[in-house]
Amino acid sequence: MSHQVKSGQHSVSRVPGAIVLCTSILLAACSDPQSPQPESPSAASPQAPTAASGPTSFGQIDDARLNNAPNEPENWLATGGSQLAQRFSALDQINLDTIADLKPAWSMDFDTMRGQESTPIVVDGVVYVTTAWSKVYAADARTGEQLWQYDPQVPGKAGFKGCCDVINRGPAVYQGKVFAGTYDGRLLALDAKTGALLWSAQTTDPDSMFSVAGAPRVANGLVFIGNGSSGEFGGRGFVSAYNVDSGELAWRFYLTPGDPAVPDGAASDEIMDSIVQPTWFGPHTDYRGGANVWNSMVYDPEYDQLYVATGNGFPWVRKFRSDNKGDNLFISSIVALDARTGRYKWHYQETPGDSWDYDSVADIILTELTLDGQPRKVLMHTPKNGFFYVIERGTGKLLSAEPYVPGVTWASHVDLETGRPAVAENAYYDDEPVRLSPGEGGGHSWQPTAFSPVTGLMYLQANAYASTRYIPRESYEFVKGMDYMGLWHFVSHGPGEAPDPNEPPPPTPQTYLLAWDPVKQEAVWKTDGRGAGVLATAGNLVFQGFSRNVVMGELAAFRADTGEKVWSHPTPNAIITGPVTYSLDGEQYVVAATGAGGGSIIAASDDVRMPQVGRLVAFKLNGTATLPAEPPPARPIEPPTETFAPELVARGAELYVGFCTRCHGFGARSANIIPDLRRSPALGNAELWEAIVQQGALESRGMINWSHLLPDDGAAEALRAYVVEQARASVR
């Protein structure tokens, strides 16, 4: 892995209003005259607020403040609120008696139109937040006035490196610096007052398919960062620590083994040889691995250790990854490391030999529980596999594990003596398809969870009875840049497989906000709804964001003890992350980053809208702001009149599934976050279509040149034929 440290200057937006795309075919939407054009930042240099407006210090957080953050609820000092990462606030001005008066206080527009998953950090009157395309903003927490913005100039073609949009989950703030990862694999340190670049480190191989979207963690003069994408595109996950002042690499720990004959020279070398390599079988390849740390990391000051939550293995199917044998450490695990050295301390693997995309990347929450009459320092975890885990922080010992959603079929239970799940006999789908629950979307995914020490309950968005039909392939071929995971994906039946009329229909999924008792390991209440991340407060409230018809949103509040919905307010953008809260001048605020996208970029909608910029939206009691209007309807579908041979359309359909679905939606039908191709005026221009798809005419805006991956024998025209037919079918 290469490593560079650079110093530099503040940067402003590069192309105001450009809709930068991920993969597949944009075709003309970047120049769509109906697309909203956000204003360029008016200042070429950052603006420090006056003393009258409040902030006089910027990002002055040290380890003492971080470790004492629960006693400083007027701020939100870290992702999760504190080093405990409970997403709980002791603020209670907004409560059951006052919630009816909660109204918009301010909003601030970003200049990107893709998914917004950031957790804002609030320090002494300043909100720090990241956006899609890894941009970083600072805003006055009273008014939402932009103080500065930093644009790291992520190349548009870097969007090709991820499965789930060019999102960023937030910054870290420490010792007057703001730290953020970039989608092309850099770690940035910015001056918290001015936004000036202090240093930049390339944390991943630029030629790899790795991306960085997770929020960093900080402690003891180090900043920790993981990465993503190898669970879908190949490679070994790892976590790195950098010196906060210099940007020099302090240590690195790999989560899956490399070539056993070539040590990495990393903190993980010893443990790789002793316990990790023996759990992998078959020949080593450069692409196998996974176990990315793409979401949750938590620093525990009591044990001076860093917990990292790891993703699925690659390829997904163990048959192709490890000769159908072995636990494959450290995929789908929690690993505890010495925070200062990166030395291995312990691990617990939640899904040994994972073949189901059961990432263990959900938020890790630290607390103390009384179990069997004894106080225990524990971490709590709700990974995609559907089991709620309570683990002893000092040793990694499993204390309890029960399904937090009904209908789990991949395993019957977890044996508390061995810590291992009792995996169903047919779960590995080596020869025949099998439907399992939870499916690849999980009983819960990455969306922020919360724990209230007042109620003793954990709160999360849950997906019960969600399932996936896992369809085996006979062989595997790795292609760099393609999400070939070892099974038939984005299809309900494999080639030549006819639907079985006697096959029972899949169970109907149920989605709800869940309150869970981690001591009794049982549900306390459920409130129906497809929501996102949550925040718990001492006002006996749980706040949660929602999507309305994919693109628009809502912020809602529920009673923390009963789940009764007590308040909601529409937002022009969907909320797909979690809100935070803070207090200034005796007033409590609730703020969230808003903007549709993320994994929902492929979601379809019956009410397709024009793209809109993301925003920060803040609420307070008796707020007087008016939120921006919802986006207007998208341009109508007006398919070309030309017709195509059925054989060409059929070929285009096959190509579309493999190359385009992951960004443009099933059947060329999407919510228009990334353009709905049925509406593209370029559909009627074969030459333009070819130039964009096969010649990279829009590569600088995010639409890569696909010529190195698509076959060159008329593939682009076949895709156009398929999309035209999908457009025509939509207006019949």
Image: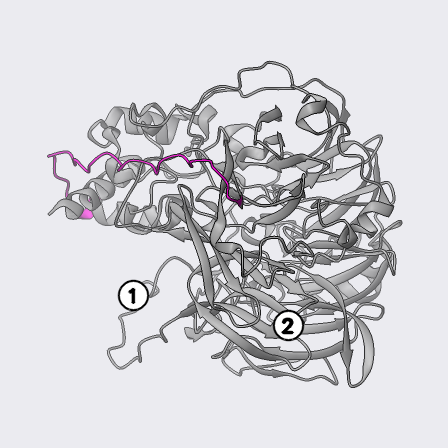
Q: Which picture quadrant has residue 141?
A: top right
Q: As drawn, which residue projects farthest toward the top?
A: 44
Range drawn in magenta: 621-648
- Checking the image for residue 325, the label placed there is 2
Does 583 appear above or below 301? above
Of 401 and 540, which appears nearest the observer? 540
| Disc 1 secondary structure class | loop
Q: Can residue 694 be seen in this view?
A: yes
Image quadrant holding the N terminus, namely top right
* Mark pair 1, 2: CA separation: 29 Å
Residue pictured at 82% horizontal, 54% vertical: 268
Asked whether, in this view, residue 182 is left or right of residue 71, the answer is left
User: Is 303 placed left or right of 347 in the picture?
Assistant: right
Residue 500, given in percent of the width and then of the height, sits at 27, 76
| Residue on which disc 1 sits | 496
Nearer to me, 178 or 140: 140
* Above or below 498: residue 401: below
What amino acid is labelled 1 in the image? Gly
Residue depicted at x 58% and y 41% = 168
Q: Magenta segment, principal secondary structure?
A: loop
